[in-house]
Image (cartoon, coloured by chain):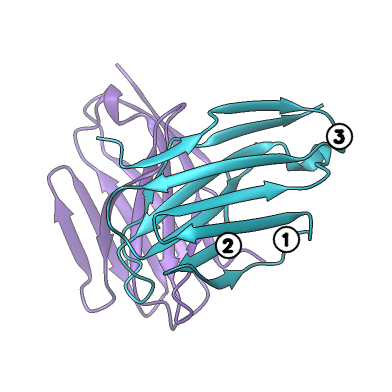
Chain colours: A cyan, B purple
Amino acid sequence: ETAVFQTPNYHVTQVGNEVSFNCKQTLGHDTMYWYKQDSKKLLKIMFSYNNKQLIVNETVPRRFSPQSSDKAHLNLRIKSVEPEDSAVYLCASSPDWGTAETLYFGSGTRLTVL
Amino acid sequence: QQQVRQSPQSLTVWEGETAILNCSYEDSTFDYFPWYWQFPRESPALLIAIRPVSNKKEDGRFTIFFNKREKKLSLHITDSQPGDSATYFCAARGNTGKLIFGLGTTLQVQP
């Protein structure tokens, strides 16, 4: 049963445009994440929020910015997309940061940049 | 530099055989090792996990063997089924709390 919801499922856009992805979890978890999965299936953490506070900010281009209104929501905005941003963006949650033992992933947003 | 390495990149076995997926890591402070599986067009999901205090963890047909001294672990899938065909990711949690994933092994089980 899905408990981490992502929208949209797919997005096709052109270089230079701005895109936003939404994520909501109904598990009552404190921690949420954005992962990027590239065409080679490499899963790489981008950001993590714990109770609306940013706790992990990997080395990602500045055009990526996460936004959290409450602990159940974590959105991702990309200003001026580049071709290398084409990937699947996976949102995930875990009960808390200290014991991030199980990640619950959403279904992903597949971004294609033309 | 990949901190969690997996081999082989892809593996094909016949139905009923045992598939062995390997994983190694660099950082001796890693304290938790989950395996996630991902079916085509789906998201990763936790399959099984182990902590360094154990050298074996079993769950049905899936068993993790862990060698702390050599910093290696392996996932054994006995009596492989076509429905086991997926990409398997080994991951490790460091003292920063982050889960670091390997590049995955794509398993194909032929009927």
Q: In terms of image quadrants, where is residue B65?
A: bottom left
Where B111 sits versus B14, above or below?
Answer: above
Estimate the spatial distance between the alpha carbons at disc 1 and disc 2, rounded to whole Å.
9 Å
> What separation in Å lies between label 3 and label 1 (alpha carbons)?
17 Å
Whether residue B37 can be seen here: yes
Q: Residues within 10 Å of mark 1 (few under 14, many from 20)?
A: few
Q: Locate the N terminus of chain A and report the quarter of the image it occupies.
A: top left
Q: Position of residue A66 (x, y in %)?
A: 62, 57
User: Do dots 1 and 2 share one subunit?
Assistant: yes
Asked if the residues shown at circle 1 and circle 2 are in contact, with their CB atoms under 8 angstroms apart, the answer is yes
Give the amino acid type for the residue marked by disc 2 in the picture.
Phe
Say above or below: A112 vs B54. Answer: above
Type of the residue with mark 3: Val
Q: Is residue A100 left or right of residue A10?
A: left
Disc nearer the start of the sequence (3/2): 3
Q: Quadrant of residue B111?
A: top left
Q: Is the residue B67 above or below the residue B23 in the image?
A: below
Residue A58 spot, x, y in % from top left: 65, 67
Q: Nearer the viewer, mark 3 or mark 1?
A: 3
Could you say where residue B50 lies in the image, as x and y percent from the top left? 26, 65
What residue would you read off at disc 2? Answer: A47
Circle 3 residue: A15
* B4 or A69, nearer to the observer: A69
* Disc 1: which residue: A60
Q: Chain of mark 1?
A: A
Judging from the image, mark 2 belongs to the subunit labelled A
The disc labelled 1 sits on which kind of residue? Answer: Val
